[in-house]
Amino acid sequence: MESANRETARRQIEQAIAGFVAAYNQRDTDAVLSYYAEDLVKLRHEAPPESKADTATRLRAVFSSFTVSFSVTTDEIIVGERIAMARGSQQLHLIAKRGGREQVIERRFLDVWRLDEDVWHIARAMDNVGYKPT
């Protein structure tokens, strides 16, 4: 892939990440899911692997029970022909709609993006807790 095409792809993925974050903060499950490939495999910290359908079920439950504030810091995007990788950190603030203390979930992430019919989708996603020295 030529340098100009890689830069265009990198910008498209950056825009997709921004759209994903906006959709998450609007608690719009369908919009969030539109960024995932149909064959999504999502590996969350200390949780069983999820398909796109599993992710949809979990998100609907979260969005119905919590007010959310989600942010992403992207440290790196590497683009290949039809596959790209984005890595960084994410922070999710959850406040139960029925009251309660705020929960903050901080994770590192690694997402594999795939170009499907000229649209970049997350095909594989992984997150874990970052290293914190004691």
Image: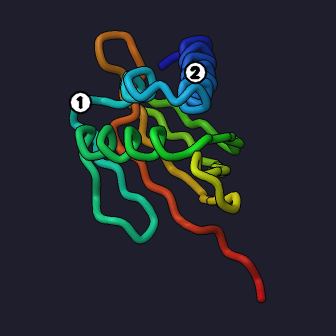
- Residue at the image position 55 percent from the left and 52 percent from the top: 109
Secondary element at image label 1:
strand
Name the foreground residue: 126 vs 118.
126
Q: Quadrant of residue 21?
A: top right
Where is residue 111? Give x, y as percent. Answer: 47, 44
Give the residue type at disc 1.
Glu
Q: Is residue 104 above or below residue 73?
A: below
Where is residue 17? Give x, y as percent. Answer: 58, 28
The residue identified by callout 1 is 38
Give the residue type at disc 2.
Gly
- Residue at the image position 64 percent from the left and 50 percent from the top: 95
Name the foreground residue: 40 vs 21.
21
The answer to whether residue 7 is left or right of residue 60 is right
Where is residue 93? Give x, y as percent. Answer: 67, 50
In the orientation shown, which residue stands out farthest toward the front?
98
The answer to whether residue 107 is left or right of residue 46 is right
Name the foreground residue: 58 vs 3.
58
The residue identified by callout 2 is 19
- Residue at the image position 47 percent from the left and 20 percent from the top: 1
Secondary element at image label 2:
helix
Q: Quadrant of residue 8?
A: top right
In the orientation shown, which residue stands out farthest toward the bottom?
134
Q: Is residue 82 above or below residue 77?
A: above
